[in-house]
Image (tube, helix red, strand yellow):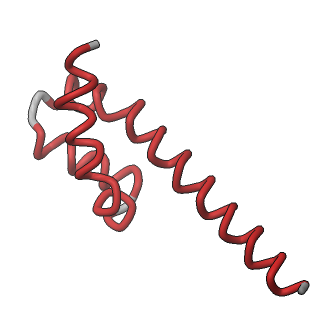
């Protein structure tokens, strides 16, 4: 039983970290686009800040969010 509880806590922590990372990326991506005025350079900036693995995990979502939701704000 103890192992199951520890696994559940670890899974919840990973989920929280993933969520917070994604929200941080959403908060920063518009600024990167504004500063660099170039999607490729903005993406490279995100890789520099968050790491390639994190960016690769979330980039499709960020691009869609930016194109569909952020541009409407």
> Vertical placement of 19 versus 69: above or below?
below
Image quarter where the N terminus lies is bottom right
Residue at 38 percent across and 33 percent down: it is 28
Near-viewer residue (66 or 68): 68
Image position, residue 15 (x, y; %): 59, 59
35 up-or-down from 8: above or below: above
Q: Residue furthest front?
A: 1
Residue occupying image coordinates x 47% and y 39% = 24
Viewed as shown, does residue 56 lie left or right of 37? right
User: Hey, which quadrant is residue 13 in on the image?
Assistant: bottom right
Q: Quadrant of residue 67?
A: top left
The quarter of the image holding the C terminus is: top left
Residue extending farthest right: 2
Residue occupying the point 26% across, 25% down: 69
Instruction: Estimate the x, y position of residue 46 in percent, counting from the top left.
Output: 31, 47
Is 68 on the left-hand or right-hand side of 30? left
Relative to 12, residue 72 above or below: above
Picture mark count: 0
| Residue 52 x/y as whole percent | 31, 64
The residue at 11%/28% (across/down) is: 37
């Amino acid at each position: 039983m103890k192992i199951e509880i520890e696994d559940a806590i670890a899974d919840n922590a990973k989920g929280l970290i993933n969520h917070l990372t994604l929200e941080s990326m959403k908060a920063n991506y518009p600024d990167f686009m504004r500063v660099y005025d170039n999607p490729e350079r903005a993406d490279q900036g995100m890789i520099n800040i968050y790491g390639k693995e994190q960016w690769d995990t979330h980039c499709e979502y960020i691009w869609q969010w930016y194109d569909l939701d952020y541009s409407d704000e």
